[in-house]
Image (cartoon, helix red, strand yellow):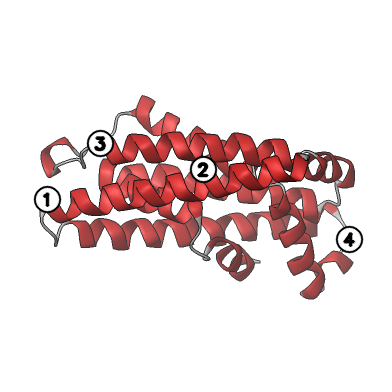
Amino acid sequence: MFVIGIVVAAPVGAMGILCIQRVVEHGWRGGLATGGGIATADAIYAAFAAFGVTVVSQFLVSYQDPLRILGGAVLVGLGWRAVRSTPATDAAEAVDSTRMGVLYTSAVGLTLTNPLTIMAFAAVFASAGLVAQAGVGSSVVVTMGVALGSLSWWLGLSTVVWAARHAISSRTMLIVNRASGAMLMALGGVAAVAGVQGLL
């Protein structure tokens, strides 16, 4: 289950780029808050799959196009903000609890705008033979394993990026921040367009 959490979290997509960008802009704690939010959403979707909550799963999947539009629009906004922002310096790296909460909740919300994650977990669980392990206890273990695996990935990614950002110049950090912001805008635009096409 731990490995499943890593496998689902590891592919570099919009959320991976967002986590990297937030480490560059806000420091290690900003990346940790973002990764924790993503892992929380992964755990929620894993729980839906593990407990077989098909009603909720089908409802979310049926509204995947509006959710893609919403998530894509938010990503475009975050990307634009990143392009216009300046990475934190060592002296200004601390993120207060309020800001940490914003980074965390926004990451949860953005990750939840991809209901197909439920289907991904269901497919992985089935291929691993986990769906045959009926019972609340096994479902809880599976969900917690996924959550810990996902969190470990984001913690590792944030730590690596945080260490790297201290080895490069401020100008390079600014370039990385703007490049990641532009990528977020592009990925958000693609997601929004896909959502619109799905509604047509």
**What is the spatial separation of the Cα atoms under label 1 and label 3, in whole angstroms?**
13 Å
Q: Is residue 150 above or below residue 58?
A: below
Name the residue: 13% across, 44% down: 90
Image quarter hosting the C terminus: top right
**What is the spatial separation of the Cα atoms under label 4 and label 1, in whole angstroms?**
53 Å
Of labels 2 and 3, the one closer to you? 3
- Amino acid under label 1? Ser
Q: Residues within 10 Å of mark 2 (few under 14, many from 20)?
A: many
Chain-order first, disc 1 or disc 3: 3
**What is the spatial separation of the Cα atoms under label 1 and label 2, in whole angstroms?**
28 Å
- Amino acid under label 3? Ser
**What is the spatial separation of the Cα atoms under label 2 and label 3, in whole angstroms?**
22 Å
Q: Residues within 10 Å of mark 4 (few under 14, many from 20)?
A: few
Using the rendered view, name the quadrant where residue 5 is placed.
bottom right
Q: Which mark is residue 134?
A: 4
In the orientation shown, which residue stands out farthest toward the top?
Answer: 98
Chain-order first, disc 1 or disc 2: 2
Q: Which residue is mark 2?
A: 37
